Image: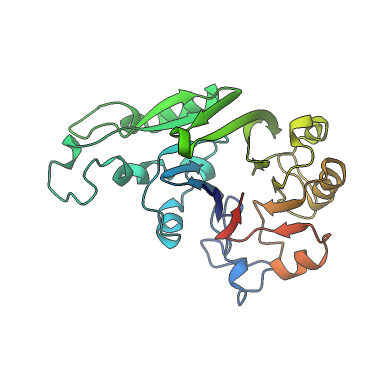
Amino acid sequence: MKTKFIILGCGNSMGTPRIDGYWGNCNRKNKKNIRSRCSAIIIKGKNSILIDTSPDIKNQLVTNNIKTVSSVLYTHEHSDQTNGLFELRPFAFVKKSSIKVNWWKNTKRINVYGNKKTINLLTKRFDYCFKKLSAYPPIVKGNIIKKKFYLGTPKERIYFDTIQAKHGNVKITGYIFNKTAYLSDCNDLSIIKRKELKNLNYLILDCLRDKNNFAHFGLKECLLVNKILKPKKMILTNLHHDLDYNDLKRRVPSNVIPAYDGLRLNL
């Protein structure tokens, strides 16, 4: 059974254009410069595993015709990765077409996974989603991520390995599956020493701007990672409005691809 991967959003924390309509260096006529906040999804049969719930998650899932979410993996606790959690309510409905007032009597919690800090903060920030505080039921169940784990039934199962890496002053969880790694926010050059990241088919990596900063890789660091880890394809995500798609594509090696919303991979 084929496994599909979709980059639902590849923009930085403000997206492109920004909420005030500012496009920066990006050509507004190029659709690949329209960037919502970072999220992705892995699909194998009916097993749909969401990575992060960005503030744009509703439109991302509708645009990509995603009808179900089986579980959610969180990279870290920042708002641009988590603020769409509340939007998952319809995926908790047991009867999907129900529009009755008492829909909340037919719900099933979605398992969400993250490191301890992320889950602890989410259960405080979105307490009403994790526990019953009113007539509305909780929609998710928090789980601390393990180093190695799998999700899905035997025929649709996806196996994961995880790493912890620096993103400024927080730790993010990077997910490795099907010879693919996803690290959407990162500035930790020690990843070049990780054996599990070498010779992947796809390495999806944070590339905020040309220059790095306290929390994100810049293009120079990404190209160094590409040279040492040697993935077949490196996909640059979390892109700032400083980086125009066509201009960036011209400046990188042939195996390096700027991400765009809706980019699909067969793993």
- Residue 47 placed where, x, y %? 44, 42
Q: Which x, y percent locates residue 234?
A: 74, 51
Q: Is residue 99 among the parts visible in the rendering?
A: yes
Q: Residue at x 18, y 49 (%)?
A: 98
Percent across and percent down for residue 212 are 78, 46
Which of these two is toward me, 149 or 237?
149
Residue at figure coordinates x 76%, y 64% from the top left: 248
Which residue is rendered at x = 83% and y = 30% of the image?
Answer: 193
93 lies above or below 259 = above
Q: Is residue 229 left or right of residue 238?
A: right
Picture quarter containing residue 32? bottom right
The colour scheme applied to this rendered structure is rainbow
Residue 178: x and y in percent read 63, 40
Left or right, 141 with reference to 27 = left
Residue 188: quarter of image: top right
215 or 64, which is in the foreground? 64
Q: Is residue 10 visible?
A: no
Q: Is residue 59 left or right of residue 195?
A: left
Give me the residue at 54% from left, 51% from top.
4
Query: In this view, which residue lies farthest toward the left?
Result: 101
Point out the residue furthest to the bottom here.
Answer: 29
